[in-house]
Image (spheres, rainbow, N blue to C red):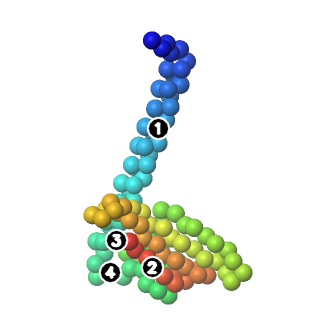
Amino acid sequence: MRKFTIAAIAALLASIATAAFAETKWVEQNEKAIKAGASRKNCTGQPGAAIGMTKEQVLSSCGWGKPSHINTTITAGGTREQLVYGLCNTRKSGLCRSYIYLTNGVVTAIQSSD
């Protein structure tokens, strides 16, 4: 029979607690993102994001608002941004994301994997 030290058991329990905490945080973040995705869908008939809008217009438009994060690329041709909007439920994959692409502060593409 193998014997474990108290220190080894404590380290194992700490590792389990850390993993459980990380999973809880991930679930909380995704639940917020899912709710944000649902609010976008409830904006029928109201202005949403469109090609040619400014970043400020997108951030204040119905249902889009603040993205979950922004990826920025600076090139010789200017600044490109990818606004990443949260997760939503789909039957196919269970998760999806929506993206708005801007070049020099103007929307050039909108991508959704709904």
Which structural element holds mark 3? loop
SS for tag 1? helix
Identify which amino acid the numbered label 4 is placed on. Gln
Question: Is disc 2 placed on a helix, strand or loop?
Answer: strand
Q: Nearer the viewer, residue 34 or 65?
A: 34
CA distance for labels 1 and 4? 42 Å
Question: Mark number for residue 46?
Answer: 4
Q: Secondary structure at mark 4?
A: loop
Instruction: Tell which circle, 1 or 3, labels the residue nearer the N-terminal end.
Output: 1
Label 4: few (<14), some (14–19) or many (≥20) C-alpha neighbours in 10 Å: few
Badge 1 amino acid: Ala
Residue picked out by circle 3: 114
Task: Give whichever of discs 3 and 4 has the lower sequence position.
Answer: 4
Tell me how far mark 1 sits from mark 3, CA to CA.
30 Å
Question: Disc 3 vs disc 4: which is toward the camera?
Answer: 3
The Cα atoms of the two marked residues, 3 and 2, are separated by: 12 Å
Q: How far, Cα to Cα, is label 2 from label 1? A: 35 Å
- Mark 1 or mark 4: whose residue is earlier in sequence: 1
Residue linked to disc 1: 19
Q: In the rendered view, does 79 fall on the left or right side of 32?
A: right
Q: Which mark is residue 50?
A: none
Callout 3, which amino acid? Answer: Asp
Residue 110, numbered label? 2
